[in-house]
Image (cartoon, rainbow, N blue to C red):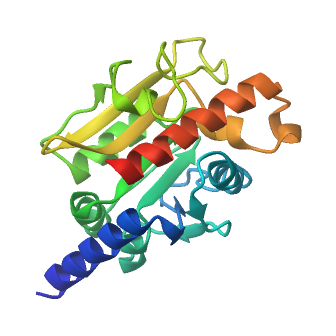
Amino acid sequence: MISRIIYLIGFVLITFQLSSQSDVSIALMKYRGGGDWYANPTSLPNLVKFCNQELGTHLREEVGTVEPDSPALFSYPFIHMTGHGNVIFNASEAENLRRYLIAGGFLHIDDNYGMDVFVRQQMKKVFPELDFVEIPIKHPLYNQAFAFPEGLPKIHIHDNKPAQGFGLFYEGRLVCFYTYECDLGDGWEDPRVHNDSPETRTKALRMGANLIQFVFNQ
Protein backbone atom coordinates (compact mmCIF):
# COMPACT_ATOMS: atom_id res chain seq x y z
CA MET A 1 0.00 0.00 0.00
CA ILE A 2 2.80 2.43 0.90
CA SER A 3 4.59 1.78 -2.37
CA ARG A 4 1.33 2.35 -4.27
CA ILE A 5 0.85 5.69 -2.52
CA ILE A 6 4.41 6.71 -3.39
CA TYR A 7 3.75 5.74 -7.01
CA LEU A 8 0.55 7.82 -7.17
CA ILE A 9 2.18 10.83 -5.54
CA GLY A 10 5.09 10.49 -7.93
CA PHE A 11 2.77 10.34 -10.93
CA VAL A 12 1.08 13.56 -9.82
CA LEU A 13 4.42 15.30 -9.20
CA ILE A 14 5.90 14.33 -12.55
CA THR A 15 2.73 15.17 -14.48
CA PHE A 16 2.48 18.58 -12.81
CA GLN A 17 6.11 19.44 -13.53
CA LEU A 18 5.93 18.32 -17.14
CA SER A 19 2.78 20.36 -17.73
CA SER A 20 3.94 23.50 -15.91
CA GLN A 21 7.51 23.61 -17.27
CA SER A 22 8.22 26.17 -14.56
CA ASP A 23 11.03 26.00 -12.01
CA VAL A 24 11.65 22.34 -12.68
CA SER A 25 14.82 20.56 -11.61
CA ILE A 26 16.59 17.77 -13.43
CA ALA A 27 18.96 15.37 -11.70
CA LEU A 28 22.00 13.16 -11.99
CA MET A 29 21.67 9.53 -10.89
CA LYS A 30 24.05 8.29 -8.21
CA TYR A 31 24.26 4.53 -8.67
CA ARG A 32 26.19 1.71 -7.00
CA GLY A 33 28.75 -0.64 -8.55
CA GLY A 34 31.90 1.43 -8.63
CA GLY A 35 31.29 3.37 -11.82
CA ASP A 36 32.03 7.09 -11.77
CA TRP A 37 28.47 8.42 -11.82
CA TYR A 38 29.92 11.89 -11.08
CA ALA A 39 32.14 11.90 -14.20
CA ASN A 40 30.89 15.11 -15.88
CA PRO A 41 30.25 17.72 -13.17
CA THR A 42 29.72 20.68 -15.51
CA SER A 43 27.60 18.96 -18.14
CA LEU A 44 24.06 19.19 -16.72
CA PRO A 45 24.41 22.79 -15.45
CA ASN A 46 25.61 23.82 -18.91
CA LEU A 47 22.74 21.98 -20.57
CA VAL A 48 20.24 23.69 -18.28
CA LYS A 49 21.66 27.13 -19.12
CA PHE A 50 21.54 26.33 -22.83
CA CYS A 51 17.91 25.16 -22.67
CA ASN A 52 16.82 28.20 -20.69
CA GLN A 53 18.51 30.50 -23.20
CA GLU A 54 17.63 28.74 -26.44
CA LEU A 55 14.30 27.09 -25.67
CA GLY A 56 12.88 29.52 -23.12
CA THR A 57 12.57 26.82 -20.47
CA HIS A 58 12.64 27.62 -16.76
CA LEU A 59 14.80 24.84 -15.45
CA ARG A 60 16.53 25.44 -12.14
CA GLU A 61 20.25 25.90 -12.58
CA GLU A 62 20.88 23.84 -9.43
CA VAL A 63 20.96 20.22 -10.59
CA GLY A 64 19.89 17.49 -8.17
CA THR A 65 21.56 14.18 -7.32
CA VAL A 66 19.34 11.19 -6.64
CA GLU A 67 19.71 7.47 -6.00
CA PRO A 68 17.52 4.96 -7.88
CA ASP A 69 15.73 3.66 -4.76
CA SER A 70 14.94 7.11 -3.34
CA PRO A 71 11.38 8.48 -3.22
CA ALA A 72 12.96 11.78 -4.32
CA LEU A 73 13.35 10.24 -7.77
CA PHE A 74 9.74 11.22 -8.42
CA SER A 75 10.60 14.90 -7.90
CA TYR A 76 12.49 15.00 -11.18
CA PRO A 77 10.91 14.51 -14.62
CA PHE A 78 14.33 13.99 -16.22
CA ILE A 79 17.22 11.91 -14.85
CA HIS A 80 20.67 11.74 -16.45
CA MET A 81 23.03 8.83 -15.85
CA THR A 82 26.63 8.55 -17.01
CA GLY A 83 30.04 7.06 -16.20
CA HIS A 84 32.74 4.72 -17.44
CA GLY A 85 32.25 1.51 -15.48
CA ASN A 86 30.10 -0.87 -13.53
CA VAL A 87 26.47 -0.24 -12.60
CA ILE A 88 24.44 -2.28 -10.13
CA PHE A 89 20.74 -2.06 -9.32
CA ASN A 90 19.43 -4.20 -6.49
CA ALA A 91 15.80 -5.37 -6.45
CA SER A 92 14.41 -2.32 -4.64
CA GLU A 93 16.31 0.08 -6.89
CA ALA A 94 15.10 -1.66 -10.03
CA GLU A 95 11.52 -1.70 -8.76
CA ASN A 96 11.55 1.99 -7.80
CA LEU A 97 13.14 3.00 -11.09
CA ARG A 98 10.52 1.01 -12.98
CA ARG A 99 7.70 2.74 -11.07
CA TYR A 100 9.27 6.11 -11.74
CA LEU A 101 9.53 5.50 -15.49
CA ILE A 102 6.03 4.07 -15.77
CA ALA A 103 4.67 7.03 -13.79
CA GLY A 104 5.97 9.46 -16.41
CA GLY A 105 9.63 9.93 -15.56
CA PHE A 106 12.43 9.76 -18.08
CA LEU A 107 15.96 8.35 -17.92
CA HIS A 108 18.81 9.36 -20.22
CA ILE A 109 21.80 7.03 -20.05
CA ASP A 110 24.95 8.39 -21.65
CA ASP A 111 27.77 5.89 -22.04
CA ASN A 112 30.87 7.88 -21.17
CA TYR A 113 32.81 4.81 -22.34
CA GLY A 114 32.73 1.34 -20.84
CA MET A 115 29.15 1.23 -19.49
CA ASP A 116 27.45 -0.69 -22.29
CA VAL A 117 27.50 -4.25 -20.98
CA PHE A 118 26.53 -3.14 -17.47
CA VAL A 119 23.73 -0.81 -18.56
CA ARG A 120 22.07 -3.45 -20.69
CA GLN A 121 22.18 -6.05 -17.91
CA GLN A 122 20.88 -3.72 -15.23
CA MET A 123 18.05 -2.22 -17.29
CA LYS A 124 16.86 -5.80 -17.85
CA LYS A 125 16.17 -5.86 -14.10
CA VAL A 126 14.02 -2.77 -14.51
CA PHE A 127 12.14 -3.89 -17.64
CA PRO A 128 12.75 -7.63 -18.15
CA GLU A 129 10.08 -7.64 -20.87
CA LEU A 130 11.71 -4.90 -22.95
CA ASP A 131 14.77 -4.69 -25.19
CA PHE A 132 16.66 -1.63 -26.36
CA VAL A 133 15.78 -0.74 -29.95
CA GLU A 134 17.65 1.73 -32.11
CA ILE A 135 15.79 5.02 -32.53
CA PRO A 136 15.23 5.78 -36.24
CA ILE A 137 16.50 9.10 -37.56
CA LYS A 138 12.94 10.18 -38.42
CA HIS A 139 11.93 9.95 -34.75
CA PRO A 140 10.72 13.27 -33.25
CA LEU A 141 13.64 13.16 -30.82
CA TYR A 142 15.94 14.17 -33.66
CA ASN A 143 13.54 16.77 -34.99
CA GLN A 144 12.65 19.11 -32.16
CA ALA A 145 13.97 22.68 -31.97
CA PHE A 146 17.09 21.50 -33.78
CA ALA A 147 17.15 19.16 -36.75
CA PHE A 148 19.52 16.21 -36.85
CA PRO A 149 18.79 14.66 -40.25
CA GLU A 150 21.57 12.11 -39.77
CA GLY A 151 20.49 11.13 -36.27
CA LEU A 152 22.59 11.19 -33.12
CA PRO A 153 25.76 13.30 -33.50
CA LYS A 154 29.19 11.79 -32.90
CA ILE A 155 30.91 13.80 -30.16
CA HIS A 156 33.92 11.67 -29.14
CA ILE A 157 35.78 8.94 -31.04
CA HIS A 158 35.77 6.08 -28.49
CA ASP A 159 36.02 2.90 -30.59
CA ASN A 160 35.36 4.86 -33.79
CA LYS A 161 31.96 3.24 -34.18
CA PRO A 162 28.96 5.28 -35.33
CA ALA A 163 26.97 7.04 -32.63
CA GLN A 164 23.74 5.20 -31.84
CA GLY A 165 20.66 6.11 -29.83
CA PHE A 166 18.68 3.25 -28.30
CA GLY A 167 15.35 3.39 -26.52
CA LEU A 168 13.12 1.45 -24.20
CA PHE A 169 9.44 1.89 -25.06
CA TYR A 170 6.81 1.11 -22.44
CA GLU A 171 3.28 0.93 -23.86
CA GLY A 172 4.40 3.06 -26.79
CA ARG A 173 6.12 5.77 -24.75
CA LEU A 174 9.88 6.28 -24.81
CA VAL A 175 10.92 6.01 -21.15
CA CYS A 176 14.68 5.57 -21.51
CA PHE A 177 17.08 6.93 -24.12
CA TYR A 178 20.54 5.37 -24.21
CA THR A 179 23.29 7.16 -26.14
CA TYR A 180 26.16 4.88 -27.18
CA GLU A 181 29.48 5.75 -28.90
CA CYS A 182 28.41 9.37 -28.74
CA ASP A 183 29.30 10.96 -25.36
CA LEU A 184 26.81 13.80 -25.31
CA GLY A 185 27.65 14.61 -21.70
CA ASP A 186 31.30 15.27 -22.53
CA GLY A 187 30.12 17.69 -25.20
CA TRP A 188 28.04 19.56 -22.60
CA GLU A 189 31.02 20.13 -20.32
CA ASP A 190 32.97 23.37 -20.02
CA PRO A 191 35.17 23.93 -23.11
CA ARG A 192 38.42 23.58 -21.16
CA VAL A 193 37.57 20.05 -19.96
CA HIS A 194 37.85 18.22 -23.29
CA ASN A 195 38.91 21.01 -25.64
CA ASP A 196 36.03 20.20 -27.97
CA SER A 197 35.50 22.64 -30.82
CA PRO A 198 32.64 25.17 -30.55
CA GLU A 199 30.89 23.30 -33.37
CA THR A 200 31.10 19.99 -31.51
CA ARG A 201 29.85 21.49 -28.24
CA THR A 202 27.00 23.22 -30.07
CA LYS A 203 25.90 19.92 -31.64
CA ALA A 204 25.98 18.19 -28.27
CA LEU A 205 24.05 20.94 -26.51
CA ARG A 206 21.45 21.13 -29.28
CA MET A 207 20.89 17.40 -29.14
CA GLY A 208 20.56 17.65 -25.36
CA ALA A 209 18.06 20.46 -25.77
CA ASN A 210 16.06 18.32 -28.20
CA LEU A 211 15.99 15.61 -25.56
CA ILE A 212 14.72 17.98 -22.87
CA GLN A 213 12.10 19.43 -25.22
CA PHE A 214 10.96 15.99 -26.29
CA VAL A 215 10.53 14.83 -22.69
CA PHE A 216 8.39 17.83 -21.80
CA ASN A 217 6.28 17.52 -24.94
CA GLN A 218 5.95 13.73 -25.02
Q: Residue at x 21, y 75 (%)?
A: 7
Judge whether residue 47 can be spotted in this image.
yes
- Residue 45 higher or lower than 71, as above or below: above
Tell which of 133 and 87 is nearer to you: 133
Q: Is 4 on the left-hand or right-hand side of 115?
A: left
- Name, please, the residue furthest toward the front: 56
- Name, please, the residue furthest toward the right: 192
Q: Is 206 on the left-hand or right-hand side of 115?
A: right
- Residue 22 higher or lower than 171, as above or below: below
Residue 75 position, x and y percent, is: 42, 74
Judge whether residue 40 can be spotted in this image.
no
Q: Is 194 on the left-hand or right-hand side of 3?
A: right
Tell which of 108 and 173 is nearer to you: 173
Residue 119: quarter of image = top left
Residue 163 position, x and y percent, is: 51, 19
Work out which quarter of the rendered image holds the N terminus and state it.
bottom left
Residue 186 position, x and y percent, is: 69, 37
Residue 69 position, x and y percent, is: 36, 71
Q: Residue at x 34, y 37 (%)?
A: 120
What is the count of numbered marks? 0
- Residue 160 higher or lower than 105, as above or below: above
Q: Residue at x 66, y 70 (%)?
A: 62
Q: Is 215 on the left-hand or right-hand side of 99?
A: right
Residue 159: quarter of image = top right
